[in-house]
Image: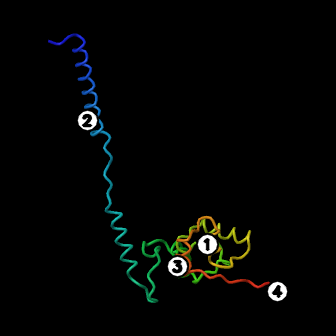
Amino acid sequence: MLTESQRRALITLLLIWAAVLGYQIVKQLFFTPDSFDFSRTDSLFRHTSDSLRRTDASGQPPSPAEATGQSATLQAASRQATWENAPLPIDVNTADAATLTRLPRIGPAIAQRIVSYREQHGPFRTPEDLLKVKGIGPKTLERIRPHIAIQHKQTSR
């Protein structure tokens, strides 16, 4: 037979087990996350990828805005900022921040740093000078090198 202290320990363990079991049941019944329906996302992805495969009369693929069926205003804004409309190579000594964002791996923050660095230190003389800009390392420089030009302004005296 069990002693009084053994009985209390057994009852305590049974109560703990019942509480954990009850918690698990309540958790499964009331707090299960709803499963996400990916069908709309998949459909949009298929539509966009099919649209991007098509080309228009000029042989250019449609802009992402056209592919996703956005409004004419958004389409015009998107066309204005696409790679196809960016004259390449981009002169890093004259380009504004918005133009610089068209370079691969250059977002708005790094583009603004390039402009700020250029304003503080003068024009870039070589592509390697871009390494002095925070956020541009050797890998980024190698990715943007084919898309940039460094033209030196000559000042008249």
Residue designated by label 2? 25
Q: Nearer the viewer, mark 4 or mark 3?
A: 4
**Residue on which disc 1 sits:** 98
- Per the image, the residue denoted by label 3 is 83
Query: Residue 47 sits in which quadrant?
Result: bottom left
Query: Residue at the spot x=64%, y=81% of the render?
Result: 91
Residue at (71, 83) in percent of width and height: 152
Mark 4 surroundings: few (<14), some (14-19) or many (≥20) residues within 10 A: few
Q: CA distance from mark 1 to mark 3?
A: 12 Å
Q: Separation of disc 4 and disc 3 at Cα?
A: 34 Å
In the rendering, at what x and y percent does residue 140 appear? 54, 71
Q: Between disc 4 and disc 3, whose residue precedes?
A: 3
Establish if 135 lies above or below 66.
above
In the rendered image, residue 79, in percent from the top left (x then y), is placed at 53, 78
Q: Amino acid at mark 1?
A: Ala
Sequence-earlier tag: 2 or 3:
2
Left or right for 56, reference 153: left
Mark 2 lies on a secondary structure that is helix
Please identify, in this view, whether the residue under mark 4 or under mark 1 is nearer the observer. 4
Residue highlighted by disc 4: 156
Separation of disc 2 and disc 1 at Cα?
A: 55 Å
Name the residue nearer the viewer: 70 or 91. 91
Q: 153 or 49: which is nearer to us?
A: 153
Marker disc for residue 72? none
Q: Earlier in the sequence, mark 1 or mark 3?
A: 3
Q: Secondary structure at mark 4?
A: loop
Q: Quadrant of residue 98?
A: bottom right
User: Which of these two is toward me, 64 or 133?
Assistant: 133
SS of the residue under disc 3: helix
Q: Earlier in the sequence, mark 4 or mark 2?
A: 2
Q: Residue at x 27, y 20 (%)?
A: 12
Name the outermost residue toward the top. 4
